[in-house]
Image (cartoon, rainbow, N blue to C red):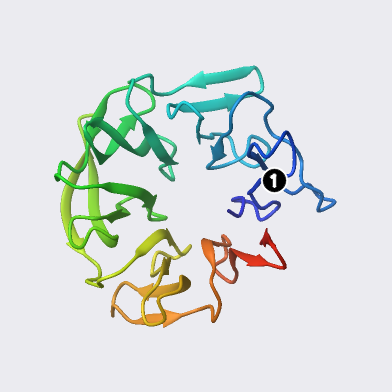
Amino acid sequence: MFSPFRAGLRLTSRKIFLGKKRTKPFGKSGIPVVLLFGIGFGIFNAAPVLAQKVSLASYYESLFAPRLTGVKPLTTHPGSDIFPTLSPNGKWLVFASNRRQNFDIWAKNIKTGEMVPLTTYKSTDTQPAWSPNGRQIVFVSMRSDGLGDLFLMDVRESHGVLRRKKMIHLNNYLGYDGEPVFSADGRWIAFVSDRQTGRRHIWLLQLKSRKLIQVTAFEAFSPAFSPDGRWLSFTRFVNGRWQI
């Protein structure tokens, strides 16, 4: 994931500590820098050196916010809280949780701590991602085929609570669509799909026309737009190892 200031790129590495994951940004020299040492592993949404507010999913599947002075838990429910993402204005944390048995999309007011479900369907909803203007959230749901389709919801704040206003099904493909991210201008969504070939490639979806464009001719994962929208980073398996 690119930093908001184009000075770094987030990645997850297995190269240290017996294969346990650590997430690192690139420094100015291009050499990855360790962000956090600890037991288990975490996946950052942003790094402390790249943004003012950060979130990560821990080994125990609660959400934490690392700061220079320590790590602060954002959720403490005994269920699993995963795929955290902060709103563009930093007021809301959206994540997937199975605190009501199946995974739904939840929103937490960072200031007040109040949490509400944005989806309540009896199926798995995960992988939320904010639009740049903070008025829409794209997510992956298995409610249609059990494999994963993209859905888009409009959200608005009302009396300190985030509410879902409208939701649409973006595609209806019998296969896997996942890992969605918005472009910087909010016009495109990049995602991973196994359509046509049965292998997972990076695709682009133009929201206005619903036009689909295949980006990669090889298997690729974890797409991320640069802030200016000119670049798209992704992960692929090359020469026996994962590379960006």
- Crowdedness near tag 1: few (<14), some (14–19) or many (≥20) residues, C-alpha within 10 Å: many
Say if 80 sits above or below 188 in the image: above
Quarter of the rendering containing residue 175: bottom left
Which residue position is annotated with label 1? 25
Q: Is residue 26 left or right of residue 80?
A: right
Kindly identify the residue that appears in the image at 27 percent across and 34 percent down. 98
Residue 161 seen in this snapshot: no
Q: Residue at x 52, y 27 (%)?
A: 65
Q: Is residue 14 left or right of residue 76?
A: right
Residue 47 horizontal side relative to residue 129, left or right: right
Kind of residue indicated by mark 1: Pro
Q: Quadrant of residue 142?
A: bottom left
Q: Please state, as top left, top right, bottom left or bottom right, where the C terminus lies in the image.
A: bottom right
- Image coords of residue 61 (percent x, y): 43, 30
Q: Can residue 159 be spotted in the picture?
A: yes
Tell me where residue 110 appears, x and y as whole percent: 39, 27
Q: What is the tally of numbered marks visible in this picture?
A: 1
The residue tagged with tag 1: helix, strand or loop?
loop
Q: Residue at x 66, y 56 (%)?
A: 6
Comparing 128 with 198, the one in front is: 198
Compared to residue 46, the image places residue 233 above or below, namely below
Q: Is residue 13 above or below residue 36?
A: below
Determine which quarter of the picture holds residue 191.
bottom left
- The spot of residue 240 in percent (x, y) is 70, 63
Look at 40% across and 37% down and name the residue there.
82
Drawn side of residue 12 relative to residue 168, left or right: right
Residue 58: x and y in percent read 51, 30
Q: Outermost residue toward the right?
A: 29
- Relative depth, front residue between 218 and 113: 218
